[in-house]
Amino acid sequence: MGIGAAQLRKSIDALAEIEPAIGERLDAIGYPPPRIRDRGYATLLRTILGQQVSVASADAIWRKLSDALGDPANPAKLLAASDEALRGAGFSHQKTAYARSLADLVTTGGLDLGLLPDDDEDAIAALTAIKGIGRWSAEIYLLFAEGRPDIWPAGDLAVQIEIGKVLGWADRPSEQDIRDAAEPWRPHRGAAAIFAWHSYNTEVI
């Protein structure tokens, strides 16, 4: 499971001590809610479905998939479904291939999501070996579903924009810029990402 509310607050308090600009923004917008997802196949499948579509569209596809399969969290049912059924649920040709590959890995034992490596980079490598899972998707899964505290999705556009604003930079920083800036924030960078998303979506009058 993801980072719980108590640990999230503790980590953000630690970040505010390290980086005063985060403390100032925290005073203005308050603490973010936790972002927690279930560990396992269903969450990773939803991550694939959510790529390059809105949250509302991804939710609609998941509902259609539920109607078509009965239990979308069962990979065997997805493997048994026809391509036509998956297309009817809103899957593209590419996402059908990705979803089938994931379901096959889980059902055959080629991937055990309960036994990912303890090292974050090794876990990211294991996840990105799956068709359709890039680094960002792997990082989001490890942060939200496993609650790994130091995951830092520096390639996320909203994180780049908001960290730049919080730190008072004139231009949006690059991925490398915010990787470098966040080094002193270890081991709380996962909380920093959650705070950045919260800040990005919060207007302060």
Image (spheres, helix red, strand yellow):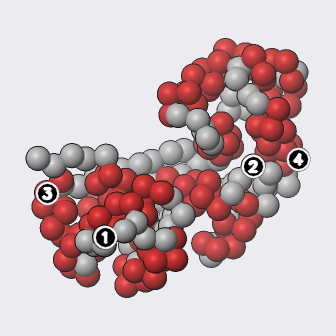
* Residue indicated by mark 4: 108
Q: Is residue 16 left or right of residue 90?
A: left
What crowding class fits label 1: few (fewer than 14 Cα within 10 Å), some (14-19), or many (20 or more)?
few
At mark 4, the secondary structure is: helix
Q: Is residue 177 left or right of residue 204?
A: right
* Residue indicated by mark 2: 132
At mark 2, the secondary structure is: loop
Earlier in the chain: of badge 3 and badge 1, it is 3
Q: Is residue 156 left or right of residue 96?
A: left
* Residue indicated by mark 3: 28
Earlier in the chain: of badge 2 and badge 1, it is 2
- Closer-to-camera residue (191/168): 168
For image coordinates 61% across by 41% down, the residue present is 52
C-alpha gap between disc 2 and disc 1: 34 Å
What is the three-letter code of the residue carrying label 1? Ala
C-alpha gap between disc 4 and disc 3: 50 Å
